[in-house]
Image: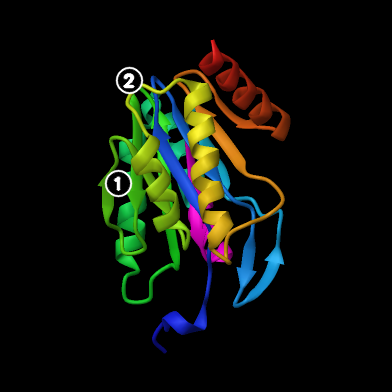
Amino acid sequence: MFFLKEEVKTGTTTVGLVGKDIIVLAADQRATMGHLVYDDEAQKLYKITEHIGVTNAGAVGDSLVIIRFLRSHANLYEIERQTRVTAKALASYLSNILNSTRFYPFAVQFLLGGVNQKPELFEVTAFGGVLERKKYAASGSGTELALTTLDQEFKPGMTEEEGVALAVKAVKSGTRRDVFSGGKVISVMVIDKDTIRTLSEQDIKKHLEKLKTREAE
């Protein structure tokens, strides 16, 4: 039985951007089943290691299977080699998994980012294509809307406050017009060379307030 696009309808808006020594990942929280809003508090940001995270777009079950693969492979890699796995190495591993199932593919798309010597961001398609993004990336049904915002406002070397503010704005662009994107709040993850943090709604507000104060000075 062949996979038909019409059988599974999914939607989301996720973004990733490269800042000054950081990666910022953000996503909406709406999960849909056809034209039904199934969940408004869905998790779409996942920590893989202490310095690598991913966003997922597509079928939830497929995404969770892949995320378990990534976590177990990363753990094994670091135990065997006694060194941190890089985002590039993990993107290559993910590509091999997805390409091996291209006849009946996982209905997923990932943005994978991390910081080792430098920030790295990769877009990995359902068929295993790997695209390194030097500035930013977006995935899901709200991609075009999010990219318009990123195209207009991204600048190299963004601070954490600037990166968080732009990521939130880009996801909001998707949720405003894409019926498959939405949810109660926007999830944001910040990765640097030492930590990976999922920001609370209050943390995001503080970042936005700091940036607004700085711009007013």
Magenta stretch in the rendered image: 53-68
- The residue depicted at 44 percent of the width and 50 percent of the height is 146
The nearer-to-camera label among 2 and 1 is: 2
Residue 54, placed above or below residue 176: above
- The residue depicted at 39 percent of the width and 20 percent of the height is 21
Horizontal arrangement in the rendering, residue 201 relative to residue 175 (left or right):
right
Disc 1 residue type?
A: Ser
59 within the magenta span: yes
Q: Dot 2 lies on which element?
A: loop
Horizontal arrangement in the rendering, residue 201 relative to residue 67 (left or right):
right
- The residue depicted at 47 percent of the width and 83 percent of the height is 6
- The residue depicted at 56 percent of the width and 34 percent of the height is 189
Q: Quick check: marks 2 and 1 in contact, CB under 8 Å?
A: no
Residue 61, placed above or below residue 23: below
Percent position of residue 35, x then y: 62, 77
Residue behind mark 2? 117
Front residue of 183 and 54 = 183
Percent position of residue 76, x then y: 45, 38
Front residue of 62 and 58 = 58
Dot placed on the residue nearer the N-terminal end, 2 or 1 = 1
- Mark 1 neighbour class, 10 Å CA radius: few under 14, some 14 to 19, many 20 or more: some
**Taking the image as drawn, is residue 196 in sight?**
yes
Q: How is the image coloured?
A: rainbow
What is the distance, in whole Å, between disc 2 and disc 1 at their CAs? 18 Å
Q: Quadrant of residue 91?
A: top left
Q: Dot 1 lies on which element?
A: helix
Percent position of residue 153, x then y: 39, 35
Residue behind mark 1? 92
